[in-house]
Amino acid sequence: MDPRTRYKNDGFPGQEQEQPGLTAATDPTPDHGEATYVGTGRLTGRRALITGGDSGIGRAVAIAYAREGADVAIVHLPEEQEDADETAALIRDAGRMAASIPGDVQDEAFCRAAVDLALDALGGVDILVLNAAYQKNREGIETIATEEFDRVFRTNLYSMMWFAGALVPHLQPGASIISTTSIQAFNPSPGLLDYAMTKAAQVAFTKALAEELGPKGIRVNAVAPGPIWTPLIPTTMHAEKVEKFGSDTPLGRAGQPAEVAPAYVYFASQESSYTTGEVLGVTGGKPVS
């Protein structure tokens, strides 16, 4: 199959949404692998906690993990309950246990409580996917209000520390932590200055934590997506930029969440048992180094 034409490659309808974006309002609907992902049992008996698991990349990972045999708990904002319910239904359709945990990851108490809820619901956690994120297009550094800067850092960075810090004492050898960084960590856009800063920090988080947890048999890796079509995009960009989203990649189009999820399966499975501290780019050809 030609990767240039596997999905829509002639642009997107101009559109904008308010934060947080919802799948039903995103045109065209992102492909999360609902009709295409076929599991082979690579995660049988595993238990995963995914932040930002209701839509976009998080939903695609949840579907893939469930079809690979894992039970899945997803963390999401209360406003995203409709998307979360659809994702939970897809997990259950795969014959696996699903748990929906609503709350705001900017809140330390919620993050720590969510870990306990996931442990109780699933009987333990073997895979932590740190995927929740917030971004907003900026018109210049002088326009970034402190409360907005704080929101980006609390969502994208603080929550990672809180979730990982609360869960690591419960993890056993063979467990895996996977974070969602971004091409922005390596090729930052001025309009996403504060977001790009957090994504670069996530790379350092991944490499440092891999060094710390390697002796305990716990692997830590990251996926760096490029332009992926999710509800986050029309909430971030002006309509005219949405129309051309992803057209600047060597493959000439944006990616779909279903094309990113296999990277998370790889890092969670035994196929990557000798891989830790790595960042895997899924970018349509944009360089990650």
Image (cartoon, helix red, strand yellow):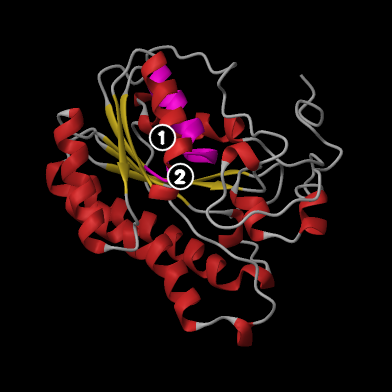
Horizontal side of residue 30 vs 134, given as left or right: right
Q: Mark 2 or 1 closer to N-term?
A: 2
* Residue 172 visible (yes or no): no
Horizontal side of residue 135 vs 130, given as left or right: right
Q: Quadrant of the C terminus?
A: bottom right
Q: Is residue 54 magenta?
A: yes
Crowd around label 1: few <14 · some 14–19 · many ≥20 (10 Å): many
**At x 60% / y 46%, what residue is drawn?**
231
Q: Position of residue 10 (x, y in %)?
A: 87, 38
Q: CA distance from mark 2 to mark 1?
A: 27 Å
Segment colored magenta: 51-68
Is the magenta region chiefly helix, strand or loop? helix
**At x 63% / y 56%, what residue is drawn?**
235
Q: Quadrant of the N terminus?
A: top right
Horizontal side of residue 70 vs 248, given as left or right: left
* Residue 224 visible (yes or no): yes
* Residue sitting at the far bottom: 142
- Which residue is label 2 attached to? 80
Residue 289 or residue 143, whichever sits in front: 143
CB of mark 2 within 8 Å of CB of mark 1?
Answer: no
Residue type for callout 2 = Glu
- Which residue is label 1 attached to? 267
Quadrant of residue 54 within the rendered picture? top left
Q: Position of residue 205 (x, y in %)?
A: 36, 60
Residue type for callout 1 = Phe
